[in-house]
Amino acid sequence: MVTMADDDVADESTAPDDVVGEDVKRDLTAAVGAVEDPEMAVGIGALGMVRAVEVDPASGAVAVRLVSTYAGCPAQLFIERDVAAALPGRAVHVGWDPLPWSPDDVTPAGRAALAEVGIAVPAGAGATPTCPYCGGTVEITSTAGSSLCRSLGYCATCRNPVDVLKHPGAPDAAGPAPSPRVTPVPVPTPVAVRR
Amino acid sequence: MPTAAPPRAGSALLTRLADEELFVGHVLTSIAGFGPELEINLALSSIGQDELGHCRLLHVLVHGPERDAVNGAIWGRPADGFTAAPLAAAYTEDWADCVAAHLLYDTADAHRVALLAGCDDPDVRAVADKVAVEERYHVDFWTTWLGTTVRADGDGRGRVQAALDRYLPLGEDLFDPADGAELGLGADDWADAHAAWRDDLTGLLGGHGLDARWDGPVADLGPDRDRIVEELHFVHREAPGRW
């Protein structure tokens, strides 16, 4: 997607940066990273969704490479729009890399920010989430939650419902009912194709 | 004058897989809200959204990232242009049908995605890796729901078995090796994945006291497919350009 952040300042987009200094690139990266995921109210940089911000020294145009939390996330359109708006006066190209994302990509600052809005982040695949309100143990009550990247949980300590970032590697992902499987579900691994 | 990029190798296969994800995603998001439990409706919606997202990823491989190109590939095609296998077109409004058809589809799809993750094209492999991670809990969900259904009082087990008998023969088409060679996936690779799926499914169903009956009559889901395509095209036909 190529978009102009602001039609009123479109002419400035052609102003070249003869040399793109590290400070400019750092500022642009920070501006992109500060764009909030509208479903989580936390910056996409802290969520580990920003993979690259490149500046064309001739045109000043910015190419932003992002990774979606989940491919079907409907917030992608809004994030593209908000990234462009965060870089006024520049032509902005936002692309999505088809790479897996997991809570492991969230930065420590992101974990703290998510806790502030009541979202728990598992410490790793299979780790029991900690309640962002009281520090108690969160039980996953439904793998599917209020958005594609979240599960529903419950903290028996403070009796609060808790959103938990899905960890796709979690072996204890719960189904809709607490019914242990009779037969473990096989998960195919990438195969070595014949040549 | 710039020349158009050559079509990606394996485009026909990738389009077929995208169509299947589209059909499954359309059905699941259409029936979400009618489920017997809140968590089931959340899962139907989430799984359906996942499938629609994967449809888009696959179309991006074929058509590039521009939204108009991807949307055109879906809504710009005539009704007879979709190439999804019949099982993906099951319009499952009965819950036994829903559990059976989608368990079959997602268990088979997991094997196909694993196959793609080993293909020759690194871009396709990247998409397959993302899809595999995101779909990991799909099979878990269907299996759990299968278990609760067959253990419930009443005729749950019989209804699920009847639904499996109806849909299982259609699952064979999900391993059609056509067009895979362009990605380095030969007929033997597809046959191996197909056999692995059969083995897994036989064990999974047997664990729940259900039978995998592979040789039953092949159901005609043509009306289901026509309904999906009609629903897909309806809004675009009624209000072109107004969304």
Image (cartoon, rainbow, N blue to C red):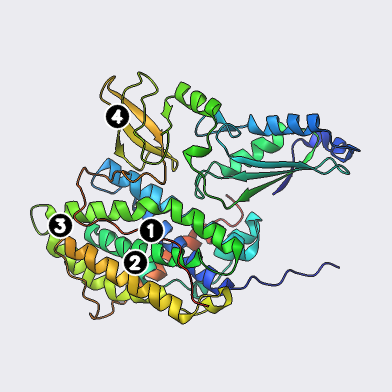
Q: Quadrant of residue A85?
A: top right
Which of the pair B173/A97 is nearer the observer? A97
Q: CA distance from mark 2 to mark 3?
A: 21 Å
Could you give the CA–CA distance between mark 4 and mark 2, rounded to whole angstroms? 35 Å
Residue carrying label 2: B90
> As shown in the figure, which amino acid type bears the numbered disc 3?
Val
- Residue in the image at 65% along x and 39% along y: A81
Q: Are marks 4 and 2 in contact (CB under 8 Å)?
A: no
* Residue B243 on image: x %, y %: 57, 49
Dot 3: within a 10 Å radius of its alpha carbon, few (fewer than 14), some, or many (20 or more) residues?
Answer: many
Q: Chain of mark 2?
A: B
**Residue A147, placed above or below residue B28:** above
Q: Secondary structure at mark 1?
A: helix
Relative to residue B74, is residue A57 drawn left or right?
A: right
Residue behind mark 1: B27
Of labels 2 and 1, earlier in sequence is 1
Please report the residue visible at 36 percent of the width from the left and 40 percent of the height from the top.
A126
Residue B184 or A89: which is nearer the viewer? B184
Residue A130 in the image: x percent, y percent?
36, 27
Per the rendering, the mark at residue B150 is 3
Residue B242 visible, this orientation: yes
Q: Earlier in the sequence, mark 2 or mark 3?
A: 2
Q: Secondary structure at mark 2?
A: loop
**Residue found at x 43% / y 32%:** A121
**Amino acid under disc 1:** Val
Q: Position of residue B14 (x, y in %)?
A: 54, 68
Chain for disc number 1 = B
Q: Is residue A128 left or right of residue A2?
A: left
In 3D space, how far apart are the residues under numbered discs 1 and 3 (Cα atoms)? 23 Å
Q: Are marks 2 and 1 in contact (CB under 8 Å)?
A: yes
Measure the C-alpha gap from mark 4 to mark 3: 27 Å
Q: Mark 3 falls on what kind of element? A: helix
